[in-house]
Image (cartoon, rainbow, N blue to C red):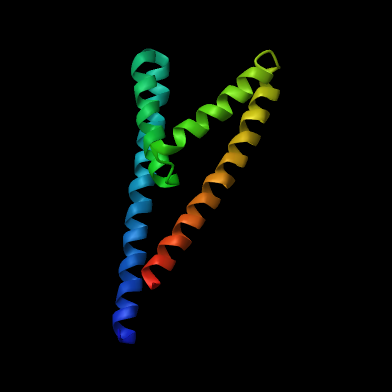
């Protein structure tokens, strides 16, 4: 059994690691936002590559692995079939609504997966 001091040290270590990770992410975002703005004004090919890198980083943070790509494709096809001729503000609204629904679905899946892992560890 761990002592109170050991538990406290682990908590402090975790907080410091989280803070370092958050600072690293903030720095990444600041740099990539500027790089994207520059690239979209002078080199669109590079801009799309930077956007891809940026999205991969967000996927890591959101824990949206490649296994979710098929689900994202399904949602995109649904939206494309129903709103391709709609005004821009309606298309934006539809995409944001569907993204929120998908986020909830993926988070629920993640919570269930964690519950199963915890249960398996206890058994």
From the top left corner, tell me how far across and down residue 85 is, in percent.
68, 13
Q: Residue at x 70, y 17 (%)?
A: 87
Q: Residue 71: where, in percent of width, then height?
A: 51, 34
Q: Residue at x 33, y 18 (%)?
A: 46
Give the camera-side residue of 33 and 62. Answer: 62
Task: Say how many tags the image has.
Answer: 0
Task: Please tell me in which quadrant of the rendered image residue 34 appears.
Answer: top left
Residue 38, image quadrant: top left
* Image location (x, y in percent) of residue 22: 38, 52
Percent across and percent down for residue 52 are 38, 27
Q: Is residue 84 above or below residue 37?
A: above
Tell whether 43 sits left or right of 81. Answer: left
Rendered position, 123 above or below 23: below
Residue 99 vertical placement versus 41 (above, below) = below
Q: Quadrant of residue 42?
A: top left
Using the image as rendered, state which of residue 47 and residue 108 is in the foreground.
108
In this rendering, would 38 be left or right of 78? Answer: left
């Amino acid at each position: 059994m761990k002592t109170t001091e050991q538990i406290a040290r682990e908590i402090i270590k975790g907080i410091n690691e989280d803070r370092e990770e958050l600072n690293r992410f903030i720095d990444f975002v600041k740099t990539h936002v500027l790089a994207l703005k520059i690239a979209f004004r002078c080199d669109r090919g590079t801009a799309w590559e930077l956007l891809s890198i940026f999205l991969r980083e967000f996927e890591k943070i959101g824990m949206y692995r490649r296994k979710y790509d098929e689900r994202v494709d399904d949602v995109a096809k649904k939206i494309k079939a129903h709103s391709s001729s709609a005004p821009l503000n309606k298309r934006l609204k539809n995409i944001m609504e569907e993204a929120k629904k998908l986020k909830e679905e993926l988070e629920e899946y993640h919570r269930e997966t964690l519950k199963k892992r915890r249960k398996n560890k206890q058994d």
